[in-house]
Structures are given as C-alpha cells and as structure tokens.
Image (cartoon, rainbow, N blue to C red):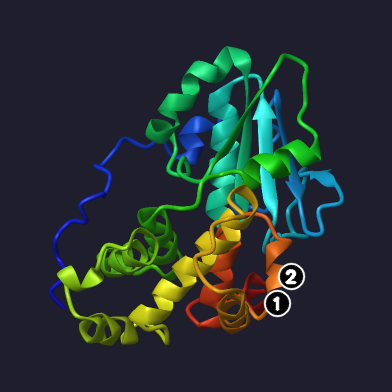
Amino acid sequence: MTVSRTPSKRRSRRWSIHADQLSTASTARYLDQNKLPQTPGVECVIIRPPYQAAVPLVGRLRELPPPLGSTIHAEGHHVLPVLGLLTAITHRWPWVAPSIALPTSESPFEPWLSHISDIDARLAVSSIRVHQHLNMRVILSTVRNRPPPSPLAMADYVVSRIKAPELSEALYYQFREAVERVPAAREASLSTYSRHFADYGRYSAQQWRMIAILIHQLVRQHSEPHVQLIHIRTANRYVRRFLGLSWTEASRLFGWEWVLESALRRGGYIESPEKQT
C-alpha cells in the first residue's frame, strides 16, 4: 500500500495537556479506579437514552459504561478543571458526546480549546452566566447542533479505537471522498485500499465510505433537513447493516460518535464493554 502522503487537510502537531495535568484531582488515576474525583466547583452529569433525565455522575462508576447515544456534560467556574474531567471521562468512554458549559467570564478560552484538549473537535460548547445551570434540553440541543464530523475526526476516532494508526491516512481518504467528494483514487485504487483494510477487519473501502455518509446524513437531518445525501431506502439499508437499527431508532439518538462505535462493534473490530467484563 503506497498511501503515505500527509492528507492535505491534516492539522499540524499541537501541544496537548493531558487529563491529569488539567485536573487538580488527578482525574485519570481516579477513573482507572472506577471513581470520579471530587473536583470543587465542577458538576458533571450523564444523559442516557431515552433522554428523560440528567443524572449526576458521582461516586463509583461501576454501573457504567454508558449506552450508545449518551451525552456527558460538565460545567463549572473555571475551564481547565472542567475540561480536564470531561477529557478524562471521554478517553474512558469515547462513544459519549462531550458537552461543556463555560461561564461568560471564561469565554475567551473557547478559541484555545484546540490547544489544551484533544477532544476539541467533538465538544459541544455553551456559555452560562454565574450561578446558572443548563437544563437537559439545552444540553442535548447543543450536542445535536454540532457540525458534522470532519473526515479527519472520523479517521482519528477509528484508529484510536482499534489501535491502528497506520490506517489513518487510508481511512481519511475514504471519509473525505464520502463527504467532500475528493476522489480517494488520487492516492490509490479502490482494490488497493480494500486489500489494505482486509488485513484489519471486514469492512472494505466502499463500506467505510457508506458509514461516513450515514453519519453525515444522521447528523444533518435535524440542522439541514433539506439535505439528502442518500435515498431513505438506502439509509435504512445502511443503518440495519452497520448499526442493527431502523432509521427511526437511529434518528432518536444524539451525537455521531456512537454511530462509529456501533459500526466497529458490529464489524468485530472491538468488543462491547459488556463482553469485556
């Protein structure tokens, strides 16, 4: 496989602060022990399907992992401990949609999120006034209104989950063709890609493109209902093949991370957490 050039839209290497550096309570160590640290001034809730309540995420975490389609929301007076806790939790359960609320006094930090956390491309960001708390519907609306994931964000998610960074560029080219219409054949043929992917699992280059199209259709159906990337019958076929759901069932879930996660589990690339315990 001769896919070795750096994708034209890849971001440059950046400085990232890890979770235990961001959180004054050594967040990562606590999460390894199935505990959530007591971080003063930080509140964290989980919103699980069918989205009837925002439940405080406190104490031990053995009742988790969260189901697919869940959202984790954190807010507090200062951005660094809030972001540190949220980043650590998202590293433990990558399929959750991360949401953060920043006080208006901390809003100047928003443009810098990409420099202090590696989940910036996924964050749903809101602003709150002092002593204000977001209600569940506002949190979910903010998550749903995130822009569709970029080809790079989707490739990063897959290679991180299956621990195969050498697939990053090949996946990026498939996702880019699917959602940006830039031919992957500029780099290698479809058969070359598929032979490369066959060494890692069952999905071919064409199937990875189908998954990307499905994700964008699911995300954009609410913010851009007039945009139809695929026919509804094709969409139904895709969701049943890759997610084991109907289109109606898939449409009720928030976020896009769960779609990739479900496709990876159904494809046999990773096991669901329930099978690992």
Look at 41% across and 83% down and name the residue there: 203
The x, y position of residue 88, in whole percent, is 55, 45
Q: Residue 192: which numbered mark, if any?
A: none
Q: Local crowd at mark 1 within 10 Å, few (<14), some, or many (≥20)?
A: some
Name the amino acid, label 1.
Answer: Ser
| C-beta proximity under 8 Å, tags 1 and 2 | yes
Classify residue 38 by image quadrant. Answer: top right
SS of the residue at dot 1? Answer: loop
The x, y position of residue 199, in whole percent, is 31, 85
Instruction: Identify the residue position indicated by label 1 in the image.
Output: 246
Question: For this view, does 158 lie left or right of residue 226?
Answer: left
Q: Which residue is at the front of the view, 217 or 53? A: 217
Q: Quadrant of the N terminus?
A: bottom left
Q: Is residue 224 above or below residue 39?
A: below
Q: Which residue is at the front of the view, 187 or 85? A: 187
> Taking the image as drawn, is residue 24 in sight?
no
Classify residue 172 by image quadrant. Answer: bottom left
